Image (tube, rainbow, N blue to C red):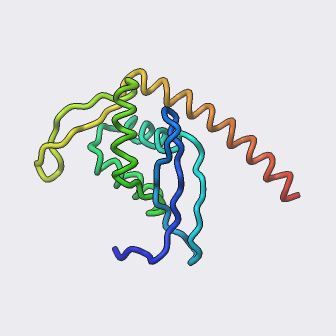
Amino acid sequence: MERPTTFWHLDVFSLFYNSIRRIVFWPMTKNSQYRDLFPGALEIMILQTLSKSPMHGYALAQHIKSVSADLLQIEEGSLYPALQRMLKAGWLASETGLSARKRPVRLFKLTEMGAKRLEQELSSFKKMFAGINRVLAISES
């Protein structure tokens, strides 16, 4: 796939540290702009994806890219530090496994603590989005 000449970077502010993480967003328009993504977006996407099945880092990034219809592309410099923070927090566990090409990889899986965190975050984000939708609905009226 040929990479577009322009793209948006969505800044993701980490829940754990106040550092900026990058997710590349392929735009529908030619104008390159920067957009903030809500805090914890990368973490919740990782937790949700791993709630379905364990994956190695590259497969995780490719899954998110595919599910988002190629709109989100997680860069390695954001993904692997996030995975390490989530391992330290106890939300994920890892083990050695084999990739589809029979190469050794580190598989990440959701822990019970991670499942609880995912449930909390999903509830919080649903409330936040409900509030945003209410404001937008009033603004459109």
Depicted 52 relative to depicted 135: above or below: above
The residue depicted at 34 percent of the width and 29 percent of the height is: 87
Q: Nearer the viewer, residue 122 or 76?
A: 76
Percent position of residue 62, x then y? 34, 55
Q: Is residue 3 left or right of residue 117?
A: left
Outermost residue toward the left in this view: 102
The residue depicted at 12 percent of the width and 48 percent of the height is: 103
Outermost residue toward the right in this view: 141
The residue depicted at 57 percent of the width and 34 percent of the height is: 122
Depicted 75 relative to depicted 118: above or below: below
Q: Nearer the viewer, residue 119 or 105?
A: 105
Tell me which corner region of the image, top left, top right, bottom left or bottom right, holds residue 111: top left
Quarter of the image where the N terminus is located = bottom left
Q: Nearer the viewer, residue 53 or 82?
A: 82
Depicted 6 relative to depicted 129: above or below: below
Quarter of the image where the C terminus is located = bottom right
Depicted 132 relative to depicted 84: above or below: below
Q: Is residue 101 left or right of residue 11?
A: left
The residue depicted at 40 percent of the width and 40 percent of the height is: 82
Percent position of residue 113, x then y? 42, 21
Q: How many marks?
A: 0
Q: Nearer the viewer, residue 83 or 102?
A: 83
Q: Is residue 119 left or right of residue 114?
A: right
Percent position of residue 133, x then y? 74, 48
